[in-house]
Image (spheres, rainbow, N blue to C red):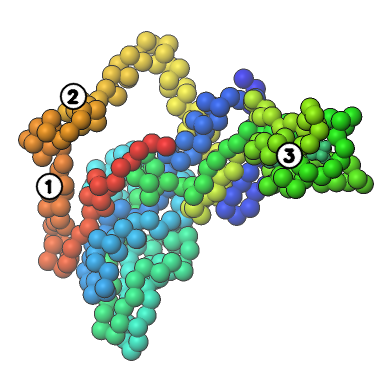
Amino acid sequence: MVLKVKVLNVDEDSVSFLVGGVDVAFTNALRRTMIMDVPCMVIDDIFFFDNSSVVPDENLSQRIGYLPLKTDLDRYILPVDCDCGSELGCEKCRVVLTLDVEAETETITVYSGDFISEDPSVVPVSPGIPLTKITPGQAVRLEAYARLGTGKEHSKWQPVSMAVYQHVAEIEIDEDRCTNCAECIRACPRDVFILDDGKLKVVDVNACTICGECEKSCPVEPIAVRARPIDDLFLFTVESTGCMEPAKLVTEAVRILSDKLDKFANKVELGETADTLNIFQVDQVEQDRLYKGGVEDIDDDNEDSTSGLDGAASEDADGDKEEEIVSKVDLDEERNGVSNVEQ
Ligand code: SF4
Ligand code: SF4
Ligand SMILES: [Zn+2]
C-alpha cells in the first residue's frame, strides 16, 4: 500500500489534507487513533480548600476537568509509564495548577485564566472560559493535578474537537449533452460549480459531499453530470482542542497507529492473537445486563459488586492534607458514571 498525502490547509487549530491509496478501514483507524489514543493533558484530581460559590464542588470539578490544557508530549509521560508509583504523580507525569480567587468589593467571574501553573507551558488553552461567579466574601481556592490520558479512558482526554473524513468526489460533466442551463449550480448546496463564459465548470471538487442533488436537478436525458466517490482518496479535516498543534496531533496519531500495527503483526507472527481476543469476551453478568429482557434477571449481589461508586466516594484526601481540605473530588468517580463508548 502506497500512501499519498497532500496538505490542503493548516492553521493554528485545524488541518485538512488528502490521503490517497488507502481504504476506509485504514482511514477510520487513523481517525479513531486521533480521537482515542493521542494523549493530552487535563486536570484529573482536585483538592478544594474553599468553595463558597454557588456552584457545588462536583459541578465545578467537572467544568474544570473539561478545560483543554496546552500539552507538551515530549516533556511528560503517561502515569502508567511512570515509575513513581504515586497516586498524584511526580514532576515527570503531572502538573499542579492552583486557583485562589476571592471577591472583595463586587461580584466577579472566576476564569480559566486565573489558574496558576507550576509549569508555564501547561496552562488552559483559553484564559477566558468562565468557571463560576463569586460575590463579596466568597472565594474559590483549590489545587488541581493535571496528567496525560487518552480519550479511551474518558472523553475529556480527547485532543480533537473534530476529526472527520469524507470520500473525495469525481465529477464528470458530459459536455456534448450539457446545455449549460445552470440548474445544477442552483441545486448544489456546496458551490461546487460555476458558469465560466457560459460554460459549466467545477471549481471546488473537495467541497462536494456527493449528495446527488446536481444529478437530480439535471433536466437532460440521460443526465449530463455525475458525482461519484473515488474509492481510495479521502479528505480529512482535523480540529485540535488547542492542546497541541494539529500537525503534531496527526503525526502522533500516525506514530501510535504504526506502533500498534507493528505489535499486532508480531502477535500474528507468534500466533498470540487468540489470547488477545479472549480478553474482550464479555462476562456472563454483563451479557445478562446487555442482552436479556427485564431487570429481574440481574443478580442484585452482582450488581452491587460491579458498581463500586460508594467505595470511590469514600476514598477522600488522605495523609497530612486531610485537615485543611474541605473535599477532594476524584474525577474517576464521575468517569464511572459516563459511558465511554468507542466511536
Ligand atoms: S453531489 Fe451534491 S455537493 Fe456534489 S456537486 Fe453535486 S450537488 Fe454539489
Ligand atoms: S443541469 Fe445538467 S444540463 Fe444543466 S448545466 Fe448542469 S449538467 Fe449541464
Ligand atoms: Zn510519575
Q: Is residue 240 above or below residue 62?
A: above
How far is mark 2 from mark 3, CA to CA? 55 Å
| Amino acid type of the residue tagged 1 in the rendering | Gly
Please rate how many residues cluster around mark 1, counting C-alpha atoms within 10 Å: few if below 14, some from 14 to 19, many from 20. Answer: few
User: Nearer the N terminus, badge 1 or badge 2?
Assistant: 2
Q: Which of label 2 and label 3 is nearer to you?
A: 3
How far is mark 1 from mark 3, CA to CA? 63 Å
User: Nearer the N terminus, badge 2 or badge 3?
Assistant: 3
The quadrant holding residue 341 is top left
| Mark sitting on residue 311 | 1
Q: Is mark 3 within 8 Å of ligand 2?
A: yes
- The residue identified by callout 3 is 217
In the visual, does 248 lie left or right of 260?
A: right
Please rate how many residues cluster around mark 2, counting C-alpha atoms within 10 Å: few if below 14, some from 14 to 19, many from 20. Answer: few
Q: Is residue 104 above or below residue 85?
A: below
How far is mark 1 from mark 2, CA to CA? 23 Å
Q: Nearer the viewer, residue 80 or 336?
A: 336
| Amino acid type of the residue tagged 2 in the rendering | Gln
In the visual, does 183 lie left or right of 71?
A: right
Q: Percent from the top left, x then y, of residue 156?
A: 38, 50
Q: Secondary structure at mark 2?
A: helix
